[in-house]
Amino acid sequence: MNKLCEKMKNVTLLSVIMAIVLALSIVITAIFGVNYAATVNDQNTLTLTINSYFYNNRLDDVKDVCEKELEKLSIAYTYSGKMDGDECELVYVFDQATNLDDVKTALKKTFADKTKDDGEWDGAFIEVATASETLQTNIPVAYVVRAAIAVALFAGLAFIYVALRYRLYMGVTVAIAIVLSAVMTAAVVLLARIPVTSSILYVVVISSVLAAIFTVLTMNKIRSNTEEISAEEKVYASVATKEITAITAVLGASLVLVGAIATWSVRWFAICALVSLLVSTLIGLIFVPAVYVPMKKVEDKTALRSKSGYIGAESKAEAKTEE
């Protein structure tokens, strides 16, 4: 794995690739907008209110009638459930542009014929209603601002901690990884047109946390490596590939399991979280060592000058003055 990471060590090329992805994401989103999940889009609904006895025993028959009338329309999703008292609901959700007037009239007539006295469904109660829901904003701007502030604060605190505990350039690398992971996660999700909800903001923050963990693991191994080898060899030999791979495998398997058994709203969160995990892993394994190598060389030169007694031109001038 370390050899594979070393082959992709051109930090300029990696930066260009990420810049292209980010630019494409901005352009596509500006043209087509954010691909919000159906559960947060403006929508029209067709609601059937059914008495509980008929709901429990003949719900499939009701669905068959509805699906014949709705076969030419695109259904976003459906849900159903029991309410208080003797009433239950079956709800079909559509895009806001879908006109449901004709369908509503046809279903009302069909159910009236079936539930009349001596009818096929005599004794059943089925009421049909439509509604339209318009959301003023899908993800409030304030939420986005708070998420950006959270990532920025976290990057600043991580920089201070790592710079004081390890080295200055290690702190710089961690801060870069945190911000870059958050930005690239959002860019990939938007560019891939994955349906998003407000949970994407949590995903972005999680991505920055994972990037910080992966980067600190590598920095810790670099500091512990006492081999007398070049800066580049030491960095790539110290990449925490085993630890990062293990964390990614465990979290990835958990997200796949959650997505497989959850509802669609949770499933979209799991998919976005999986993207954030992959992005932070790639940054930790490939971009972090590539960007830290030149910084490490500067650190080693500075340390070498200090050990050799180099004190700089100003200090030499001051020494001569004192003499």
Image (cartoon, grey):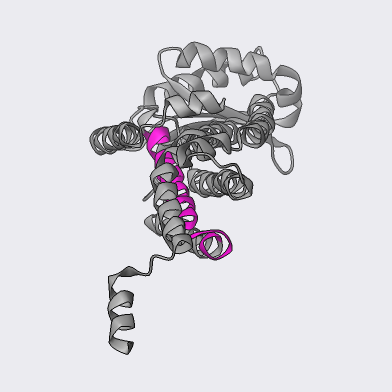
Q: Position of residue 173 (x, y in %)?
A: 45, 50
* Side of 242 relative to 27 (left or right): right
Residue 20 versus residue 105 in the image, above or below: below
Highlighted magenta segment, given as a residue range: 162-190
Residue 45 versus residue 112 in the image, above or below: below
| Residue drawn at the location 54% of the way across and 46% of the way down | 215
Q: Where is residue 63 in the image (x, y as percent from the top left)?
A: 60, 17
Q: Would you identify the image quadrant in which residue 240 lies?
A: top right
Residue in the foreground of this view, choosing between 163 and 318: 318
Q: Magenta stretch mostly in which secondary structure? A: helix
Residue in the foreground of this view, choosing between 122 and 307: 307
Does the image show residue 245?
yes
Residue in the foreground of this view, choosing between 204 and 95: 204
Does residue 118 belong to the magenta stretch? Answer: no
| Residue drawn at the location 29% of the way across and 34% of the way down | 16
Does residue 180 belong to the magenta stretch? Answer: yes
Q: Where is residue 113 in the image (x, y as percent from the top left)?
A: 56, 16
Does the image show residue 132?
no
Q: In what quadrant of the picture does the C terminus appear? A: bottom left
* Side of 212 relative to 104 (left or right): right
Residue in the foreground of this view, choosing between 47 and 214: 214
Q: Where is residue 142 in the image (x, y as percent from the top left)?
A: 40, 59
| Residue drawn at the location 63% of the way across and 28% of the way down | 259
| Residue drawn at the location 45% of the way across and 56% of the way down | 304
Q: In what quadrant of the picture does the N terminus appear? A: top right
Q: Would you identify the image quadrant in which residue 58 lies?
A: top right
Q: How many numbered marks appear?
A: 0
